[in-house]
Amino acid sequence: MNLSSQEQRDKSFAEFEKQGESAVRIATLSPAWDNDRFTLGMATEWLRLKDEERALAASKRRDEREERTLFIARRANTIAIIAMIFSTITAIVPASDKVILFLQWLGVLKP
């Protein structure tokens, strides 16, 4: 019974999964598969897909980390703005008595 190319690919990939990535990498570098170009090609493709999966996972983790960093930065900016508002209010309130006294002294306000 002949297997379709997709079935052969799936069978090869399943076998590579059993062997593990390290064993497949070593086998592609050794002369073991020199005469079996199909298996060598399938192994190379499988390893390329594994590398892509790893790169995609790393990219996703990096994106999540950057989103978290941006969230923290925005929260820090909001806290800083609130602190500036409170410090401004704190500076104005004690000075308001002096402003009122000055305006009364000028006669602008009646005591």
Image: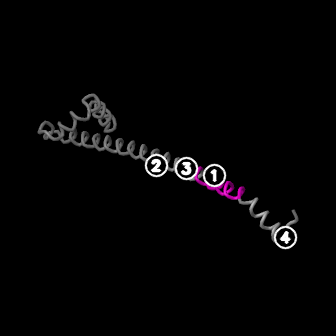
Query: Along the polypeptide, which appears first: circle 1 or circle 4?
Result: 1
- Which element carries disc 1, helix, strand or loop? helix
- The amino acid type, in three-letter code, at marker 2 is Glu
Q: Which residue is mark 2?
A: 66
Q: Nearer the viewer, residue 69 or 109?
A: 109
Circle 1 residue: 82
User: Magenta stretch mostly in which secondary structure?
Assistant: helix
Using a 10 Å C-alpha cutoff, classify the residue at mark 2 as few (fewer than 14 neighbours), some (14 to 19) or many (20 or more). Answer: few
Q: Residue at x 64, y 54 (%)?
A: 87
Location of the N terminus by quadrant is top left
Disc 2 element: helix
Q: Nearer the viewer, mark 1 or mark 3?
A: 1
Asked if disc 2 and disc 3 are in contact, CB closer than 8 Å, the reply is no
Q: Specify which label sits upstream in the sequence, 1 or 2.
A: 2
Residue at 71% in and 60% down: 95
Q: Nearer the viewer, residue 13 or 88?
A: 88
**Dot 4 corresponds to which residue?**
108
**How far is disc 2 from disc 3 in space, using C-alphas?**
15 Å
Q: What whole-number distance in Å separates the C-alpha atoms at marks 1 and 2?
A: 24 Å
Question: Where in the figure is residue 46, as x and y percent of width and height?
Answer: 29, 40
Give the extent of the magenta segment: 79-94
Quickly name the residue at label 3. Answer: 76
Q: CA distance from mark 1 to mark 4?
A: 34 Å
Q: Give the residue at x 42% y 43%.
A: 61
- Label 1 amino acid? Ile
Q: Is residue 50 magenta?
A: no
